[in-house]
Image (cartoon, helix red, strand yellow):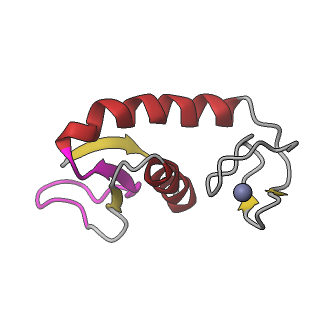
Amino acid sequence: MQALYQANDEIEAQLLCDWLGASHVRATVLGRYQSAAAGELPALQFPMVWVLEDDDVQRARQLLEEFLSRRAGAQPGVPWCCTCGTEVEAGFDLCWHCGRGRSE
Ligand SMILES: [Zn+2]
């Protein structure tokens, strides 16, 4: 298991997890309820996304880049609804559920 990305909040962490999961990369979010390690100052805990299988790490990094670049280019907007009925975040042009595009 390897750490992939420190998210700014749980929503972002969960979105990334779902994004990875849609590409069959098993990931999990840790750190939400962890207290600071002994001897350290209590720090604000940001959720960390971990990749469960070491073999998936390289693929996960590619997906992470895609995730971040899509989000950076995203219009701050409302989620859109795919023809399959899935609600998709505004930053994504493809439905994570069925893979169809926004305009299809
Ligand atoms: Zn869909």
Number of labels in the image equals 0
Q: Position of residue 68 (x, y in %)?
A: 57, 33
Q: Nearer the viewer, residue 44 or 73?
A: 73
Q: Is residue 1 left or right of residue 56?
A: left
Q: Quadrant of ligand 1?
A: bottom right
Q: Is residue 60 magenta?
A: no
Farthest residue, direction bottom: 33
The reply, left or right, for residue 90 in relation to residue 10 is right
Q: Quadrant of residue 55?
A: top left
Assign the magenta stretch its main secondary structure.
Answer: loop
Q: Position of residue 84 (x, y in %)?
A: 76, 63
Residue drawn at 38 percent across, 41 percent down: 5
Compared to residue 65, the image places residue 78 above or below, namely below
Residue 44 part of the magenta segment: yes
From the viewer's perspective, is residue 11 above or below residue 72? below
Q: Which residues are magenta?
A: 35-53
Residue 26 locus on image (x, y percent) = 33, 54
Is 45 on the left-hand or right-hand side of 35?
Answer: right
Measuring 27% from the left and 44% from the top, which residue is drawn there?
3
Q: Residue at x 38, y 31 (%)?
A: 61
Q: Position of residue 71 (x, y in %)?
A: 66, 37
Q: Which image quadrant is residue 6 in?
A: top left
Q: Quadrant of the C terminus?
A: top right
